[in-house]
Amino acid sequence: MKLQQISVSLSIGCVIYFFTLALDCITVADFSCAPGWKSYPYLATCIKAFTSSKNWYEAKNVCQEEGGDLVKFRDKKKVKFLADNVLSVHGTYWIGKKFYLKGYMNDCVEYTYFGYFVPNINLCTKPFYFICEVPSVCENNTYGANCSNRCSPHCGGANNSCDITNGSCANGCVGGYHGELCESVCENNTYGANCSNRCSPHCGGANNSCDITNGSCANGCVGGYRGEFCESVCEDNTYGVSCSKRCSPHCSGVNNTCDKTNGTCVFGCVHGYGGALCDIEIESVESASASIGTMSYSKAALVAFIILFTFVYSTCVCLVPMRRALHHAGRSTPLDIVTESEELSLYYSSLGYSDILTY
C-alpha cells in the first residue's frame, strides 16, 4: 500500500513537473518589439539584456530612456524566459529591485547567470550588466494582450494607431467621431476631429446639419448665403437659396439692390413698376381698373333699364282693368278728364270694395 502511494505521488509529481517545465520552456518569436528586444507574452512587454557595465543607478537611467525600467521578477516563468530567450552572455546583471533591509541600504539585487540564475545583493555603485523591460509596441494597429485587438479605424494620427494597452486613441479621432475609442459619431450639428467644430447656422435642410467629416453643407444654404460651408453672403443682385435667383431689374437704388433672403426691393421700385419684387407694371394695373369701371357703368345702365321697363309694364297692367271698370259703371266722363282718384274709386267698386275711401 505504501509503495502504491509513493508511486502515485511520484506520478502526479512528474506530471506536474513536466507540465510546468513545458510551460516555462515556451519560446516566443519576435513580434511587436523593436529589433534586439524579445517579446514577453504574459505581460505584453519587451525585454533586452545590455552587456555594457553600469552601476545600478546608471542602468536604471538607460532603461528609462528606452521607455521602461530595469526588469522585475514576479514569478519563475520570467526567470526561465530570460534564461531561454534573452541572455546569452554569462555574468552578473542588475535587476529592478533595490534592497532596503536594515544594514543593506546601499545594496541592490543582481542575478548572476551561468546558464541558470543565482540571486544576490551587491553595492549599488558596482558596475554590472543589466536587463531592461519596456512595454511592447503592437504592430498593424493592434493592442491588448498579445496584440489581439484592433485599434478603431477612426483613431487620428498616422496609421490610426492607438494605446497598446487599452486601445484608446492617443492622437484623438478623425473627422466625424469622438470618444476615448473614437466609436461615437458626431451629433448636434458638430463635425471634424473629436467633433470640436459646429456646422454653419446657414446650412440648409433640417437642423442646419452638415457633413460630419469636413463641415460642408450637404443640403445647400439658406436664403442669402452661398459656398461649400454657407459662410459667404450673396453677391449684389442675387438672393434666395444658395443665391440662385437674381433681383428684379426694376428695383430702385444702386445696382437694383434687393433683400438677399427673399428678393424684396429694399429701396422700392423704379417708375412704372410696383409690388414687393417690382415685377408688376403699374400701367397694366390702371388699365385693368379702367376696364373694371367701364364694366360697372354698363351694368348700372342695364339695371336702370330693367327697373324702368318693369315700372311701365306694371302701370299699363293696372290701368287696363280700371278703364274696363269705368265702362261697366256707365260713366260718360271722358278718360282724359277723369282724375286719378276717381279711376281708383271706380276700380275698387268694380271689385266689390265699396267702402274704400278715395283721396
Image (tube, rainbow, N blue to C red):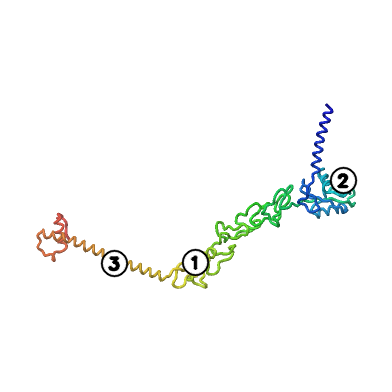
Image height check: is 217 above or below 152? Answer: below
Q: Which residue is mark 2?
A: 115
**Image coordinates for residue 326, horizontal then vertical, percent:** 12, 60
| Mark 2 surroundings within 10 Å by alpha-carbon count, few (fewer than 14), some (14 through 19), many (20 or more) | few
Is tag 1's residue or tag 3's residue first in the polypeptide sequence? Answer: 1
Tell me the quadrant of the picture where the N terminus can be found.
top right
Left or right position of 123 against 216: right
Q: Which residue is mark 1?
A: 264
Question: Which residue is found at the position 84% from the left and 47% from the top?
Answer: 97
Q: Amino acid at mark 3?
A: Ala
The answer to which of 16 and 227 lies nearer the viewer is: 16
Q: Which badge, 1 or 2, comes first in the chain's sequence?
A: 2
Q: How many residues crowd around disc 3 within 10 Å: few (fewer than 14), some, or many (20 or more)?
A: few
- Where is residue 130 shown, x and y percent of the image? 85, 51
Disc 2 on helix, strand or loop? loop
In space, the residues marked 1 and 2 are separated at their CA atoms by 94 Å
- Residue at x-position 57% and y-position 58%: 208
In the picture, residue 356 is in which quadrant? bottom left
Amino acid at pointer 2: Gly
Q: Amino acid at mark 1?
A: Thr
C-alpha separation, residue under disc 3 versus residue under disc 2? 133 Å
> At numbered mark 1, what does the secondary structure look like: helix, strand or loop?
loop
Left or right, 84 with respect to 159, comes to: right
Q: Earlier in the sequence, mark 3 or mark 2?
A: 2
Measure how far apart labels 1 and 3 are at the Cα level: 43 Å
Say whether residue 269 is left or right of residue 71. Answer: left
Residue at 67 percent across and 55 percent down: it is 173
The residue labelled by disc 3 is 301
